[in-house]
Image (cartoon, rainbow, N blue to C red):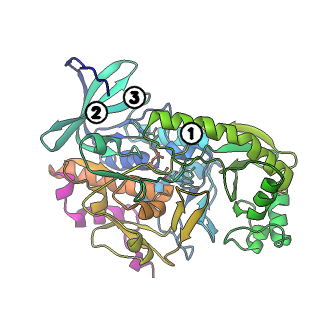
Amino acid sequence: MKTIQEPARTTPVTREVDVLVVGGGPSGIMAALAAAEEGLSVMLIESRSHLGGNLTIGLPVLGFLDQHTRPIIAGLPQKFIDRLRLIGSASEHRPCPLHMSLTLVDPEAVKTVAMEMLLERGVEIRFYTWFASPIMAGDRLRGIITESKAGREAILGRVIIDCTGDADVAWRAGVPCEKGDSQGGMQPPTLMFCLAGVDTDQLRMSLCNEPQNYIADIIPPEYFGRNRQFIVVGLRQLIRQARADGLRLPTERTIVITGLRPGEVWVNMTRVKGVDGTDPSSLTSGEIETRRQIENITKFLIRYVPGFGSAQFIRTAPFLGIRETRRIVGQYVMTREDILECRRFTDAIAVGSYPVDLHRPHDNDCTLEYCGDSYEIPYRSLLPQGVSYLLIAGRCISTTHEAMAAIRVMSTCMALGEAAGRAAKIAVRHGLAPADIPIATLQQELLCAGAFLHSGSLH
Ligand SMILES: Cc1cc2nc3c(=O)[nH]c(=O)nc-3n(C[C@H](O)[C@H](O)[C@H](O)COP(=O)(O)OP(=O)(O)OC[C@H]3O[C@@H](n4cnc5c(N)ncnc54)[C@H](O)[C@@H]3O)c2cc1C
């Protein structure tokens, strides 16, 4: 490959903070809130114009409840949902046999409420700013270089939390990372889109009353009779029929989610195999291809699925939703067995119950594996190998491809963010590296804040 030599340059240090959070999605919002609780200086860098990450693409938050409908995520994530509920912008946690629970959130309210909560805690937010490269002193991460319309800046932090979803900071700092399955295959991305004018009562009552025609995966027909807000996954026979009639569709399953407003439905059905969310050319072809798929998917819903006869296309999500990219190889790598055997850890910092929900990289279908209860997530999975003063939260923590498919839901990512933020605060308070903080102190602090740490304590 042809290369050029970039000239060396002097970069201004514009900020020095106690805790620097990179990425303002579900994990980053919670990390910054937790770190700022006792007046530490906390800054959050976000490349987009708003907070929320995938909380803003029309998805419900899954997994606040476990497989027995008990709450397993509380603390700051629950406070965030409570704030949204105060203004009618979130639903309650609704049990779901397939997804454990769904909590509907309004994407626009998420952006505003998250921003106000961070500003109330004194977090300095910087939008339109990209993490570009790490500043290292030996194996210690000292800060980051950012790129923006103002040029390059250096921002120093005593502890840095990578909440980019893609482990951008960890990877550039030299932390070993993995991508995808044993062949590098990653879960495909989806461009979410929204339809209005859907008769969601007709949809749910057709599912309830005509189970011979409208078959959902795992969720029993009577569920739809009882619930006005729901996710439909399935209707595979309608997809087969539409294909036989000549319609090209990219998925084997219909996935639609009711919105908070009457008649609003979010569609989770575009998908492209082989997209790498860390490669802008690949991302671009993913955006182009998924956008082109919307027309046929909408035709399918209007022609074949009950309740969609008068539906109108409203909007797409602001960006292509990326399910999987890099995962750090940290001090402990969580596995599929840890999930399915409900393993417990002495350094547990969060509890999950969401199944291994793998949108398979090499075909158009999905694998779902349930553990029957809950599993714990160890602090060591937030700690990278080889680089100190760095914590990772969100979907890119240290797991295998299969375990990532379980911990990736947004309730869990929020809980991981809270744990990372509290760990960073303890590290700064005691002048320690995050890897050296007493785990009992972190666990005690999380428990005091209302978080769940141990699956056993639920019984
Ligand atoms: C199509 C799809 C459907 C899904 N369905 C569900 C669902 O129904 N319910 C559910 O709970 N979960 C769902 N998930 C999973 C969930 O959305 C993600 O796993 C979760 O949002 C990850 O949270 P995060 O904080 O790690 O990252 P993200 O939500 O991706 O947030 C990362 C943030 O970091 C910012 N950022 C990234 N790189 C940089 C950089 N270099 N510099 C500055 N900022 C940066 C981004 O702009 C973003 O705001 C779905 C995911 C996808 C893609």
Q: Which labelled disc corresponds to residue 133?
A: 2
The residue to which callout 1 is attached is 286
Residue at the location (31% across, 46% down)?
161
| Secondary structure mostly seen in the magenta stretch | helix
Label 1 or label 2, whichever comes before in sequence order: 2
Image coords of residue 14 (percent x, y): 26, 24
Asked whether mark 3 lies closer than 8 Å to ligand 1, one says yes
User: Which one is nearer the viewer's eye here, 386 or 383?
Assistant: 386
Circle 3 packing at 10 Å, graded few (<14), some (14-19), many (20+), is: many
340 relative to 331 in the view: left or right: right
Image coords of residue 396 (percent x, y): 38, 52
Q: Which labelled disc corresponds to residue 442?
A: none
In the picture, which quadrant includes the C terminus?
Answer: bottom left
* Residue 31 against residue 436 in the figure, above or below: above
Residue numbers of the magenta segment = 433-459
Asked whether mark 1 lies closer than 8 Å to ligand 1, one says no
